[in-house]
Amino acid sequence: MKVNSGFHWTLRRNEECRLRDCKVAIFGGTGGLGREIGLLLASLGSDVLVIGQNFKDNGKSNISFVKADLSSIKTSKALASEIPAESLDVVLFTAGIFASPSREETAEGLERDLATSYLNRLEIIDNIAPRMKKERNLLGFKPRIFLMGYPGSGELGTIDDLNQEQSYGFMKAHMITVAGNEALVIANAEKYPHVNFFGLNPGIVKTNIRNNLLGEDSWKSYVVEGIIGIFTQTPDSYASSIVPLLLASEIEQKSGSLFDNKGREIFASEGMSKIYAEKYLRVSRELLTSKITGF
């Protein structure tokens, strides 16, 4: 990843933020990074809506929950139509898994990682972005959509085999989702001028995202996540450092930008042009149409 040394923003202490007028939706906020970010935003006064499977924070102030299987594109589409997009200030996508050693399909005929980590985001954004408010909020910024993945890592995906039906490899499959999420930022930044789009690259953090690859509660998961936990940020430390960026005034004119785990702007992957990003999304929509009745 190449850092843009010419861009700087002022890191504010989280205690300085008072967010009673900030409404947030987090897709995948029931665990890992999404959960910690949601908890911190709620503690600062934001009204946080969490969408996911296994909610752990009943009774927490300022947090509400909608249970949904985000690996289902039909479910994601129906859910998106019910989300009050017009009132949202910040939308954060963190839901995702890592591809399994052998190819897995959802009931809709989609490679599981592709559906869970990318295609649901495409479908939800297509639904909510046009409905988001057209004016700045009381905090002074336009609606913001953040997509968490690994943008800026040089991945362009396998555009002619997104669903990995011709030849499967777990790393190749996951990189298709990485490229897809970067494409969502690059293509939509110009398509929706009333919404600011950003990509977040948290790097490697100890979470459960690798359960699908390593096996939940397996010895491999225990060892790998243990080592990762020694040398990298924890989810709560990442949340503490990235929440000020989500609210920073300096990024208001930076729609389409990507940021690393220290909040530094990074350049887009070489080859991830607007034309390529738009093609990636078009091919993705064609895949959905071919697999799911009614799309």
Image: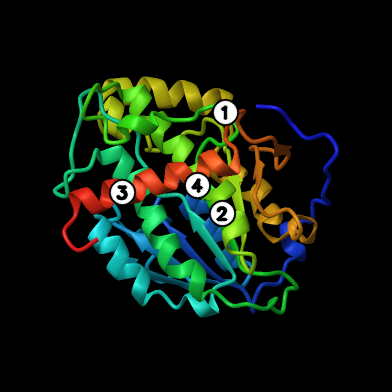
Looking at the image, do the residues carrying marks 2 and 4 touch, with CB atoms under 8 Å apart?
no
Disc 3 from disc 2: Cα separation: 24 Å
- Badge 1 amino acid: Ser
Mark closest to the chain's N terminus, 4 or 1: 1
Q: Quadrant of residue 133?
A: bottom right
Q: Quadrant of residue 200?
A: top right
168 sits left or right of 184 in the view: left
- Residue drawn at point x = 65 percent, y = 54 percent: 243
Looking at the image, do the residues carrying marks 3 and 2 touch, with CB atoms under 8 Å apart?
no
- Residue drawn at point x = 24 percent, y = 21 percent: 167
- In the drawing, what numbered circle is on residue 286? 3
Residue 215, above or below 82: above
In the image, residue 276 lies at what x, y percent? 52, 38
Residue tagged 2:
146
In the image, residue 236 lies at what x, y percent? 56, 46
Residue tagged 1:
153
* SS of the residue under disc 1: loop
- Badge 3 amino acid: Glu
Mark closest to the chain's N terminus, 3 or 1: 1
Residue tagged 4:
278
For residue 26, say whether it is visible. Answer: yes
